[in-house]
Amino acid sequence: MNLNAYLEFSPEVAEAKASGKPIVALESTIISHGMPYPQNVEMAKTVEQIIRDNGAVPATIAIMDGKYKIGLSEADLERLATEDNVAKVSRRDLAEVIATKRIGATTVATTMIGAAFAGIKFFVTGGIGGVHRGFEETMDVSADLEELAQTPVTVICAGAKSILDLPRTLEYLETKGVPVIGYKTDVLPAFYTGTSPYKLNGSADSVDTIASIVKTSTDLGLDGGVLVVNPIPKEHELDAAYIDGIIETAVAEAEDKGIVGKDITPFLLGKIVELTDGKSLKANIELVYNNAKVGAQIASSYNGL
């Protein structure tokens, strides 16, 4: 399997790989589909700098010109953030988008795939996908969960997006054998809020412990990734009753409009931004910054083992 023909490393990432520095992958769907311009570019640049400030090298991943780009230039970021018809690429779309040389933003699943191809073990995002509400009727489960079950990349996030069915998401991850480790929490964070009623099986109070868990999983040759859930900082979280009410309103509107599949998450997140007068977007940005800090610290600790 000749992957080199499909991989293009930025100079910064290539140098990091050659010198053995810790590297942290970043997704690009949050840039193209998750936030408005220019906040998306500002957020992407800030996240990359936070990772550098905490001892690692950022590698934002996207599909461009028939290749997996591992590390993006400023021009690449602008292109992703402003071009029309940027494809939202999950595993099912990957070969088609690369073969037809379309520009594509990577989801959690395809960022994990690209990171694994590139030999990058750690990936920071906002929140993962999961089991959608109304699963018993739609069978709608994010490809992120299957990817976590089969691709050996550690994902640092603020839990599953709270527009989802959180208890079913946890149950699905357990069925697939994915370890979910709470960083300084023993319950699943709910994205916009740091707590939920759903208890976790594992937690850790230090990045060194998490790095050791990841190394042990690697040494044992276990399939799949490790999911690290890191609560949004208290000063940035939204009131649970307030945001839950907003989410219910947004979900009801999506149902009324018949929005399903991969279109539903961007619709719901955009509607929630509108209904909260931007408060949810600010919270989203802050939790990504916090995840970037923790993810870089875990990667740096792992690199020293």
Image (spheres, helix red, strand yellow):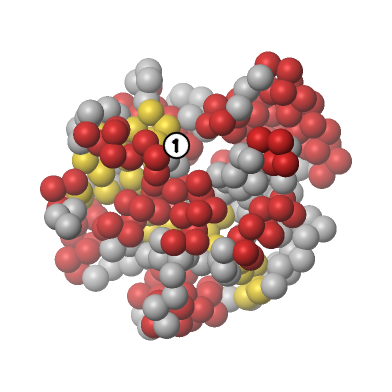
The answer to whether residue 59 is above or below residue 65 is below
Q: Nearer the viewer, residue 95 or 248?
A: 95
Residue 275 x, y percent position in the rendering: 73, 24
Q: Quadrant of the C terminus?
A: bottom left
**Residue denoted by label 1:** 29
Q: Nearer the viewer, residue 130 or 17?
A: 130
Up/down of 64 relative to 150, above or below: above
| Quadrant of the image occupied by residue 194 | bottom right
In this rendering, position of residue 219 left or right of residue 137: left
Task: State whether residue 140 appears in this view.
Answer: yes
How many marks do you count on the picture? Answer: 1
Seen from this angle, which residue lies furthest right? 241
- Residue 52 seen in the current view: no
**Front in this rendered view, residue 169 or 246:** 169
Give the residue drawn at x 51%, y 78%: 213
Left or right: residue 241 versus residue 32 is: right
Q: Position of residue 298 (x, y in %)?
A: 47, 69
Q: Which amino acid, by three-letter code, is at mark 1?
A: Thr
Left or right: 197 in relation to 17: right
Reply above or below: 28 against 228: above
Residue 197, horizontal then vertical, whole percent: 82, 58
Q: Name the residue: 71% across, 53% down.
A: 168
Characterize the local packing of mark 1: few (<14), some (14-19) or many (20 or more) Cα atoms within 10 angstroms.
many
| Residue at 73% in and 29% down | 251
Q: Position of residue 148 (x, y in %)?
A: 49, 58
Label 1: which secondary element: helix
- Look at 17% across and 57% down and name the residue there: 1
